[in-house]
Image (tube, rainbow, N blue to C red):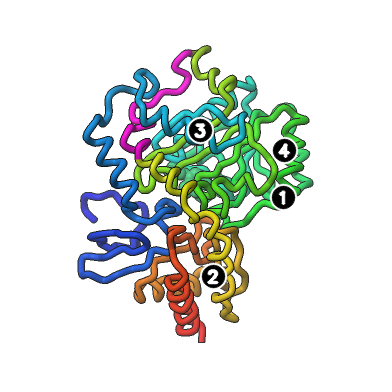
Amino acid sequence: MRHVAQTSDAPLMLEIEKAEGVYLFDVSGKKYLDLISGISVSNIGHRHPAVLAAIRHQLDRYMHLMVYGEYVQSPQVQLASALSHNLPPSLNSVYFLNSGAEVTEAAMKLAKRISGKSEIIACYHSYHGSTQGALSLNSDEYFKNAFRPLLPDIRFIRFNNEEDLTLITEKTACIFIEPVQGEAGYLPAKKNYLKKLRARTNETGTLLIFDEIQTGFGRSGSLFAFEQYEVIPDMLMLAKGMGGGMPIGALIADRNQMQAFTNDPYLGHITTFGGHPVSCAAALAVLNELTASQLIKEVSAKEAMFRELLSHPFIRSISGRGLMLALEFDSFETNKKIIDRCIEKGLITDWFLFATNKLRISPPLTIIGEQIVWACSVINESISEICQ
Ligand SMILES: Cc1ncc(COP(=O)(O)O)c(C=O)c1O
C-alpha cells in the first residue's frame, strides 16, 4: 500500500499466486472462480496453453525491436491479416496499440484528420477509457470535473434513443458507441437503433466508430457484437480480450482512411510499444483458438443457463448479451454486500462504474456447465443470506 499507487481507499487486496483456466488461487491456497475475467480480458481462460506456447515461441525469436511501423514484424503481419480475414472487406487495416484508451485516442485523431471536423459525439454512460481524450467522452461530471479543461466540442446522446439521432449533424466528425454498453451495466443496443444510427451517420458524413473493447472476441456470442446487427462501422476498436492476458489494442478501418496517418502530418500517430510482437503472437493464438473451437457457439447456451439458474426474487432484472450479464439489485449497498459474500465463498464478481447496483457476470468463455451451476448457487445463496 505504501509503494504501489492505488485508485481507491478500498482495493480488494486479494493476493493471487496462480491463475489457471477459470480459477485464481491466492497465497493461502484458496481457490476462486473468476466470474469477471479481470475485466472481460481472459476470454479463453487464464494461461491458455496455446497462448503460452505462442508467447514462448516469440520470446525465443525477438521482443521489442523498434517503434511501431518501421520494421516488418511477422507477428503483426500475421495478426493483422487474420483479423482482416475475420472482418468485412472495409475493415482491412489494423493500427496496433497497447490498451483500450489508446485506441480511443487514435480513433479520435483519425476521425478529426479524415473529416476536418472537431465535433465528437458519445453516448451517456459509455466508457472509452481514462486518458484525457477518452475521459472527455465520459458523460459523468463526477469523474471528469477535477481534470478540466478537457476536449472541447464533445456532445452526448442517449443510448438507444432514436430522437437523439438528430443531434448528429454535418458538423459531427464521428460518433463512438458500444454495441453493448459495458459500464452502464451491460445494455445491448436495439437492432433497429443501430441501423438508424448507421443511416443517420451516412446522411451527415459522420464516421461511425464501434467500441468493441469489451464486447469483442466472442463475449457477446459472436466474434464481434456488430455481426449480430447487420451494421458495419467505419472504425472498430478492440483491446481487453484480444491478447489473452497480454496488453494489446487495435484500431481497424479501411486502408484508404488509415493512410491519413501517413501524411499531413506524417507520423500522424506514433507509439513505441504498440503491436508488441509478444502481444501480437499471443493475440493470434487467441483468435485462432476462438475461431477454431466451439467456444463462441456455446456462449448463448451458457447465457441461457445463467438466466435460468439466477431466478432469485431479489434480482430485479438481468440485462446483457452472451457472457456479459448484469444482475440488478435495489441499491449499491445490497449489491456490495452480495458481492463481498460471493468473494468470501470463492466467487469473484464486482459492480459497474455507472451501475453500482448491478453485479457483473463476465466469466472466461471456457466456463463449463457445472461451474455455471456452482456460480449461480453461490450467488443465489449469497442473495438469500444478505436479503432475508
Ligand atoms: C468499452 C471500453 N472501452 C474502452 C475501455 C478502456 O480500456 P483500457 O482500460 O484498456 O484503457 C474499456 C475498459 O474498461 C471499455 O470497457
Q: Earlier in the sequence, mark 1 or mark 3?
A: 1
Location of mark 4 (residue): 198
Calculate the distance from the C-alpha at mark 2 to the C-alpha at mark 3: 32 Å
Q: Amino acid at mark 4?
A: Arg
10 Å crowding of disc 3: few (<14), some (14-19), many (20+): many
Give SS at disc 1: helix
Whether 109 is drawn above or below 364: the answer is above
Calculate the distance from the C-alpha at mark 1 to the C-alpha at mark 3: 23 Å
State whether the magenta stretch is mostly helix, strand or loop. loop
Location of mark 3 (residue): 251
Q: Residue at x 78, y 30 (%)?
A: 203
Location of mark 1 (residue): 191
- Residue 140: percent from left, percent from top: 56, 49
Q: Earlier in the sequence, mark 4 or mark 1?
A: 1
**6 left or right, relative to 158:** left
Let me know if residue 113 appears in the view: no
Question: For the residue with label 2, is its CB less than 8 Å from the closest atom of ligand 1?
Answer: no
Q: Amino acid at mark 1?
A: Lys
- Residue 75: percent from left, percent from top: 36, 31
Q: Residue at x 69, y 30 (%)?
A: 206
Q: Which residues are magenta?
A: 266-281
Let me know if residue 122 appears in the view: yes
Whether 126 is drawn above or below 79: the answer is below
Q: Earlier in the sequence, mark 4 or mark 2?
A: 4
| Quadrant location, the N terminus | bottom left
Calculate the distance from the C-alpha at mark 3 to the C-alpha at mark 4: 19 Å
